[in-house]
């Protein structure tokens, strides 16, 4: 049996945030919102657009902006205490993947204060294998995720990562999935070349990863193919022009989300330790070792408009395209140590 699980509602398009937040009041009857974000977004005023919208809806709100570059357990505990004191019926995660992951875990700690998230993480770090039932969430709070370009697709992901004393913990379960994702082009503007490179490459790795999965389906392939197409078409302009190319930034943001939908609904078979420098060579090796993989990659190449006399030539052209994207982002392509 296959599956496709995404948030209950996914809003996307420039300016969609007010429409989405209006539903918190008009559809779900929410009254108190706990906003989770980082200090930079709070100081530069990016959060104010969300706060003003909540004010217009007469939704009381509190902003917790103590999120750092990575989610650490101490901060999560402090945030969970703040959530308990405020007692919200909706949690709004805004900004980076770390902020959204933190909101997911704070909600869990708020809903289930008797459970140590560190102790159960080992039982829920592989979404394809289940020996225990994850506690059912959603008793008190509704989770809305609004990413910026650094969101790392956590808004449609069943994963959350945190650290405690330099030890990494990964929690993976569809119960962590936000109830609503809001991918607004107004929050996808890129201000640094490094932002675009990191966001684009992470999305490319996820999309290729999902496409090459043994549990890939026509549904996940559709999201993966479109994500890859958007990255190829729009990432160069985002890197060169940044926020002066708002439409391309919006399309890159949509690619990030689509790559995660594909990735979250397949079991991964590519593992390059979160890096992208080996991605092209992994595709080359996979195609050389498996006729099915070569056929799939040739199909992907055709969908991207690549030509060739046979499947191998089309796949070789696909490898070249991936290499070009990696180089564009300032990363050197590397080859795996193998005989293929």
Image (cartoon, rainbow, N blue to C red):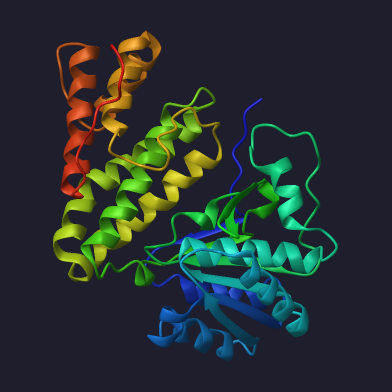
In this picture, residue 34 sits left or right of residue 308: right
Q: Quadrant of the N terminus?
A: top right
* Image location (x, y in percent) of residue 37: 52, 75
Tell me which residue sits at (58%, 84%) in the image: 63
Between 282 and 24, the residue placed more toward the observer is 282
* Image location (x, y in percent) of residue 254: 38, 54
Between 273 and 322, the residue placed more toward the observer is 273
* Image location (x, y in percent) of residue 241: 15, 65
Find residue 327 and report its image quarter. top left
For residue 300, above or below residue 64: above
| Residue 339 seen in render | yes
Tell me which residue sits at (45%, 65%) in the image: 96
Count all numbered tags in the image, as a single digit.
0
Find residue 16 and report its image quarter. bottom left
Q: Outermost residue toward the front?
A: 165
| Residue 30 seen in render | no
Tell me which residue sits at (54%, 79%) in the image: 66
* Image location (x, y in percent) of residue 127: 64, 38
Between 198 and 317, the residue placed more toward the observer is 198
In this picture, residue 197 sits left or right of residue 51: left
Tell me which residue sits at (81%, 63%) in the image: 112
Q: Quadrant of the C terminus?
A: top left
In this picture, residue 119 sits left or right of residue 272: right
């Amino acid at each position: 049996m296959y599956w496709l699980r995404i948030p209950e509602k996914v809003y996307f398009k420039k300016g969609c945030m007010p429409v989405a937040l209006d539903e918190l009041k008009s559809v779900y009857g929410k009254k108190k919102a706990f906003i989770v974000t980082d200090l930079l977004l709070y100081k530069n005023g990016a959060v104010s657009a969300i706060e003003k919208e909540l004010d217009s809806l007469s939704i009381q709100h509190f902003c917790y902006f103590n999120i750092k570059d990575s989610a650490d357990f101490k901060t999560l505990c402090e945030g969970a205490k703040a959530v308990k004191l405020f007692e919200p019926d909706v949690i709004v995660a805004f900004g980076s993947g770390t902020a959204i992951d933190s909101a997911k875990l704070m909600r869990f700690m708020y809903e289930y204060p008797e459970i140590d998230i560190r102790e159960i993480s080992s039982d829920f770090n592989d979404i394809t294998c289940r020996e225990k039932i994850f506690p059912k969430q959603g008793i008190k709070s509704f989770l809305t995720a609004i990413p910026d370009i650094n969101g790392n697709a956590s808004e449609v992901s069943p994963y959350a990562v945190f650290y405690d004393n330099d030890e990494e913990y990964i929690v993976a379960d569809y119960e962590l999935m936000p109830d609503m994702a809001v991918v607004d082009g107004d929050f996808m503007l890129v201000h640094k070349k490094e932002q675009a490179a990191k966001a684009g490459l992470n999305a490319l790795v996820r999309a290729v990863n999902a496409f090459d999965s043994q549990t890939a389906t026509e549904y996940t392939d559709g999201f993966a193919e479109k994500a890859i197409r958007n990255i190829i078409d729009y990432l160069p302009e985002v890197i060169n022009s940044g926020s002066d190319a708002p439409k391309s930034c919006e399309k890159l943001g949509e690619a990030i989300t689509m790559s995660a939908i594909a990735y979250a609904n397949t079991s991964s078979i590519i593992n390059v330790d979160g890096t992208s420098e080996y991605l092209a060579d992994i595709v080359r090796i996979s195609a050389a070792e498996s006729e099915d993989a070569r056929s799939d990659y040739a199909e992907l190449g055709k969908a991207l408009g690549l030509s060739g006399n046979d499947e191998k030539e089309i796949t070789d052209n696909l490898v070249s395209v991936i290499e070009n994207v990696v180089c564009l982002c300032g990363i050197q392509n590397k080859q795996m140590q193998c005989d293929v």
